Amino acid sequence: MDDDKKEITVTLEQDEVDIWALPELKEEYTPWKELDTAGRLKRVLLHYTIKILGLLAALYIFICSLSFLGDAFKLLGGKAAGKAFTNSELLSNPVAGLMLGVLATVLLQSSSTTTSIVVSMVGGGGLLSVPQAIPIVMGANIGTSVTNTIVAIGQITNKHDFRRAFAGATVHDMFNWMAVLVLLPVEVIVKAIFGKGWLEYISGKLVAAMEPETDDSHDQDYLKVITDPLVKLVIQLDKKVIQKIAHNELETNVSIIKHDVCGDDKHSKCTFMFEYGTHPLRGDSQMSDTAVGIILLFISLVLLCVCLVVIVKLLSSLFRGQIAHILRKFINAEFPGCAKYFTGYLAILIGAGMTVLVQSSSIFTSSITPLVGIGVLGLDRMYPLTLGSNIGTTATGILAAFAQKSNVHLAMQIAICHLLFNICGILIFYPLPFFRPPIAAAKFLGVRTSKYRWFAFVYLLFAFGLLPLAVFALSLASWIVLAAVLIPIALLMLIVFIIKLIQHKRPSLLPAKLRTWKWLPLPLRSLEPYDRVVMFIACGFRCCIALGCCKYAKEGKDELVDAKHGKQYQLNEDNEKKNGEINPVFVNGSTNDISTDSIHTRL
């Protein structure tokens, strides 16, 4: 090494910190034993009773705001999503069906609605075949995870909370994407060879053994009994309009806002907030579905952010002292001895049960995402709860299949396909503790977004918008165009992944130049150049400065974080290079070259 290069000494025994370990709980309070009677009474009434009631109220409005958000997206794109389902020729392409499932669920803000539409189209009139419907329900699995990713952004002002919250939210995304990337090609290949995909074949055998019959007595609205009184005062939508558009029974110019009948009684009148402004009798002054959707989207996002801030503050205030230690220990507890391995499977069952109760994986995962951010729930425990929510959300499709008047067996078959897909994904990415790549990918994204907080918005826009739209557009052209674009990109990503794996495991097997990425231009191996541009623009706005969006741009570079292993090292400031570049690190006399892809010089 050249003499002008400076060494950075890292003392592992003293300065190494696991950034994914649950943070130490603050104990800035007077212990219960030291309080007098008045102090204890005050703590019970003011600290616990009032704050718990406030937390329940904030959680109630938070769940209602998720309903408003879903209704807003239905108003903005629900009819377009329903119309897209009418093109059966297009849906014969599994990639197009997958991306349509993603986009439809993002627009409808509910995988339950998407799967219910698909189930009704399979069983209600044969508008979709089972092979066509399978990729769509896979895409619905991906699209439903957008909600808790949006919720995680609500903790963007705190670097450490945001890192944990974003990782906790995106572990759902990563599992769904990885499961699709593995299981969809297998389904397509098996179908090409044997005439039936493995999901189609197994689900067909199971349904034949079950012999399901029509039963529309199942109540699917457990949570809505509580939330509907408030939600229906603001907006009421006729979801059957979207299904009828999907069945090609209505044109897209029909409003999905209710006007004539708004209850079980056919003579009940509509009296919700947006009813007057959207009534057809207003003629030219009538508000369109799009206008109402934009207003409702703004209201829902404001409510979502405010409630999230209140929930996080109240949880942080309540979860302290001995109660916090007990609760966190209980949530993250492990079975003793050899039974420790099965703790995660109990969490999967709990996640499935809670999702069945609330009838929404989005609501369940979004509600526990703030707990990950404040350090009450660990990422390793969030992962099985998320997997359980994926299983629990399939209950809606099964109930919808029972409600079909005809072809119940076909409707039930696609609902069973959805269940089998999630179970098989779990069997691949959960049983082996050393092979849980969704957790590693989520940690990588958590570290990236805590350092470059604008990257969270880029990820959200790309993963749930630009990527599905681009692939869907390519699939519209032809298989040849789709393959010509995607195959080279996939091969490049595979090569990069293999090189990075060898760099990490056996760097000596690579040529000297390929042992790091320093030979690439900085914009191709780091987000730093883009960060400077974004920070230059963002820090010019007072709102960004007030929210702390650009605060981290001025913080000192005193931390070194390994994104792969979650290790954090404190640097000697005197040994840092002026331009912020990281030199090779000397640990116990050996040189470990750290690339900018896995090491961050600041958070």
Image: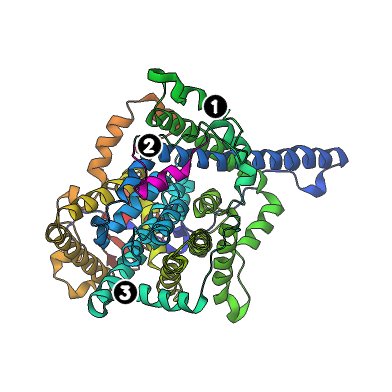
Indicate the amino acid at tag 2. Answer: Leu
At x 62%, y 61%, the residue is 331
Can residue 522 be seen in the rendering of this structure? Answer: yes
Image position, residue 32 (x, y; %): 79, 48
The residue nearer to you, when weighing 519 against 53, is: 53
At label 1, the amino acid type is Met
Q: Which residues are magenta?
A: 236-252
Q: Which residue is mark 3?
A: 197
Q: In which quadrant will I find the N terminus? A: bottom left
Nearer the N terminus, badge 3 or badge 2? 2
Element at label 3: loop
Hey, what amino acid is under mark 3? Gly
Give the mark nearest the N terminus, 3 or 1: 3
- Left or right: residue 61 compared with residue 510: right
Please state the total of marks drawn on the protein image.
3
The residue at which mark 2 appears reads as: 76
Label 1 – label 2 distance at C-alpha: 18 Å
In the picture of the structure, the residue carrying the numbered disc 1 is 273
Residue 497: where, in percent of width, then height?
24, 66
Marks 3 and 2 close (CB-CB < 8 Å): no
Q: Quadrant of residue 432?
A: bottom left
Let me know if residue 365 is in the magenta part.
Answer: no
